[in-house]
Image: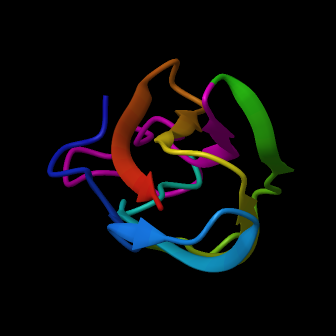
Amino acid sequence: MAKDVKPRVKVPKKASAGETITIKTLISHKMESGQRKDGDGNAIPRSIINRFTADFNDQNVIDVTLEPAISTNPYFQFEAVVPESGEFKFTWYDDDGSVYDTSKKIEVS
């Protein structure tokens, strides 16, 4: 598991029914290619975020497969239509088997 991984998301707290909102996500993750060596000459294990998903009330909104050339601290911005109050769940998957997630609620009036 990578150290100091911190997912951050920005979702409006309120919206109108059917409104399109902008969601911003960023995960602090160093990304390690597996090709570098540590001070003792041992290979540093690969640790790359390879998939990102966002669900709203258990319905998939976005599912992105990432390739090894993805930058450190991947940032995603996307739009979603919000039909009702609920919760967004954001999940990042790491090559090393780690899963990082966070969620945000939104109230629809």
- Residue 47 position, x and y percent, is 50, 42
Which residue is at 21% across, 44% downward?
40
Which is nearer the eye, 23 or 36? 23
Main secondary-structure element of the magenta-colored stretch: loop
- Residue 26 position, x and y percent, is 43, 70
Which residue is at 59% across, 55% downward?
33
Q: Is residue 53 magenta?
A: yes
Which residue is at 39% across, 35% downward?
101
- Residue 76 position, x and y percent, is 62, 74
Which residue is at 54% across, 35% downward?
94
Whether residue 21 is visible, yes or no, is yes
- Residue 87 position, x and y percent, is 46, 38
Which is nearer the eye, 13 or 26? 13
The range drawn in magenta is 35-57
Q: Is residue 31 magenta?
A: no
Judged left or right of residue 62, residue 101 is: left
Looking at the rendering, in which quadrant would you find the N terminus?
Answer: top left
Residue 27 lies, with reference to residue 64, above or below; the image says below
Looking at the rendered structure, the number of numbered marks drawn on it comes to: 0
